[in-house]
Image: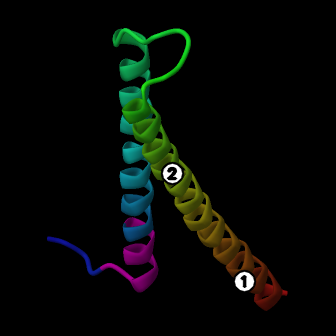
């Protein structure tokens, strides 16, 4: 019924799951910040200290997610490129 997955197929599925989860966290963070900024009355002169701390934490989370997604995708892309070059050399 189910075929056995190769190591590479399992790795691709794990990386895809990680990238999707991190992208989801990033998307939810952006939506939360936009909702907080758009629908909460703010003093136009200065942002409240607690809001400033909240935005700082959310910024750090989003930067971490962007860096992690970029690193994962870049690593997998580099690994695939190296394998493609090796396969091409072996065929020649």
Q: Which numbered disc, 2 or 1, marks the residue closer to the eye?
A: 2
Res 55 seen here: yes
Query: Mark 1 sits on what residue?
Result: 87
Farthest left residue in view: 1
Residue displayed at 56% across by 51% down: 63
Describe the element under mark 2 as helix, strand or loop. Answer: helix
Q: Which quadrant of the figure has residue 48?
A: top left
Horizontal side of residue 88 vs 45, given as left or right: right
Task: Report the front residue among 87 and 55.
Answer: 55
Position of residue 92 measured from the top left corner of the image (x, y, whole percent): 85, 87
Q: Of callouts 2 and 1, which one flags the residue occurring earlier in the amino acid sequence?
A: 2
User: Is residue 90 positioned above or below 27 on the image?
Assistant: below
User: Is residue 40 positioned above or below 65 on the image?
Assistant: above
Farthest bottom residue in view: 90
Position of residue 2 measured from the top left corner of the image (x, y, whole percent): 19, 72
Task: Report the front residue among 71 and 46.
Answer: 46
Query: Mark 2 sits on what residue?
Result: 60
Res 27 seen here: no
Task: Report the front residue among 76 and 60.
Answer: 60
Residue displayed at 37% across by 9% down: 41
Q: Residues within 10 Å of mark 2 (few under 14, many from 20)?
A: few
């Amino acid at each position: 019924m189910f075929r056995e997955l190769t190591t590479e197929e399992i790795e691709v599925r794990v990386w895809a799951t990680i990238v999707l989860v991190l992208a989801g966290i990033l998307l939810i963070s952006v939506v939360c910040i936009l909702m907080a900024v758009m629908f909460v009355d703010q003093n136009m002169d200065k942002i409240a200290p607690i809001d400033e701390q909240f935005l700082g934490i959310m910024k750090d989370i989003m930067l971490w997610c962007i860096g992690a997604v970029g690193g994962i995708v870049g690593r997998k892309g580099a690994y695939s490129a190296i394998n493609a070059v090796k396969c091409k050399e072996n065929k020649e």
